[in-house]
Amino acid sequence: MSDFALSRGNWLERGIGALRLGRANLNLRLGAGIVLAWALVALLAPWIAPFDPIAHNLPDKLQGPSLAYPFGTDNFGRDILSRVIYGARIDLQMGVIGVLFPFLIGTTIGSIAGYAGGWVDSVLMRLVDVVLAFPFLVLMLAIIAILGPGLYSFYIAMALVGWVSYARLVRAQVLVLKTSDFVTAARSLGFGRLRILFRHILPNCIAGSIVFSMSDVVLVVLSGSAISYLGLGVQPPTAEWGVMIAEGQNFITTAWWITTFPGLAIVFMALGFSLLADGLAERLGLRQR
């Protein structure tokens, strides 16, 4: 092959790499910007919300979007904009806490199963199979129905159901890494099993789980909104986007703004976390693995 062809191939590879890096940076910045914006909205809700989100104002009920009420009002005269702003607190909290505990539980179980192997791996993976045998949302609803509706029941249900994906992901990576040279070297130096697992193997395989957790936030927010819509999650009159959509479904043809704006809020929060996950995956090179 000629020097020109080799040079052309190198430039092509560099160009593709630059395009991928540019797309990763763009997705990462857009996603981080959207998530940060929602975090600021949630943090500053008492100062930026124009009205009390649960205060009734019946003379102004079902008002369309206007200068006084940019997002309109609902059937109780409550300001939709204020409720969307305060709803960001609940939905962002559901997304973060609803992912945190499954992440910790699943990562721990998956790493132990992958490194220990043998009967320990078999028992833990059969437990994973049992959980996966049931549809995700159906199992969530069953657990919440037993515990009773509410936000804490949602967190417990997510912890009991959502850990399996992290366990399978981490186990697969640990199975590969435990035969690596650096693990063999650590064993030859006399390091204990727990030290090798949690100080050498786990830090090298946690990146994939972190990226997955960013995209998992989207599923958790959507699941939380769906469960609240069904009346088993956050209870009225608390401002939560799923609750708002459920409350406005009877007015969808006459007061479209009641369901439209909280629905758009869910879409934009989900978009932010999706872009963040995609950008992280591209930046860390996980797409090419």
Image: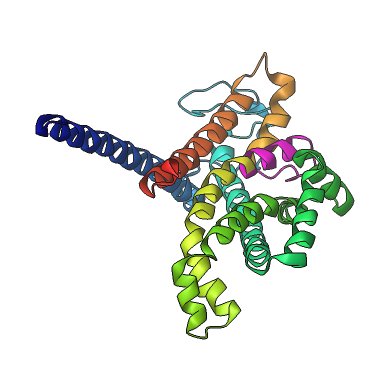
Q: As rendered, which of 107 and 261 lies closer to the eye?
A: 107
Query: Can you name the residue that lies furthest to the left here?
Result: 3
Q: As rendered, which of 106 and 255 lies closer to the eye?
A: 106
Q: Is residue 149 visible?
A: no
**Which residue: 50% across, 52% down?**
208
**Which residue: 53% across, 28% down?**
71
Position of 31 with respect to 121 (left or right) is left
Q: From the image, which quarter does the C terminus lie in?
A: top left
Q: Position of residue 154 (x, y in %)?
A: 74, 50
Query: Can you name the residue that lies furthest to the front here?
Result: 1
Q: As rendered, which of 55 and 112 lies closer to the eye?
A: 112
Position of 75 with respect to 50 (left or right) is right
Above or below: residue 47 compared with residue 4: below
Q: Is residue 285 visible?
A: yes
**Which residue: 65% across, 49% down?**
165
> Based on the displayed image, in which of its 4 quarters is residue 133 positioned?
top right
- Does 264 appear in magenta? no
Q: Position of residue 19 (x, y in %)?
A: 27, 34
**Which residue: 39% across, 43% down?**
282
Q: Which residues, given as a range, are shown in magenta?
A: 220-239
Q: What's the coloring here?
A: rainbow
Q: From the image, which quarter does the N terminus lie in?
A: top left
Q: Position of residue 16 (x, y in %)?
A: 27, 34
Query: Can you name the residue that lies furthest to the bottom here?
Result: 190
Q: Position of residue 245 (x, y in %)?
A: 67, 30
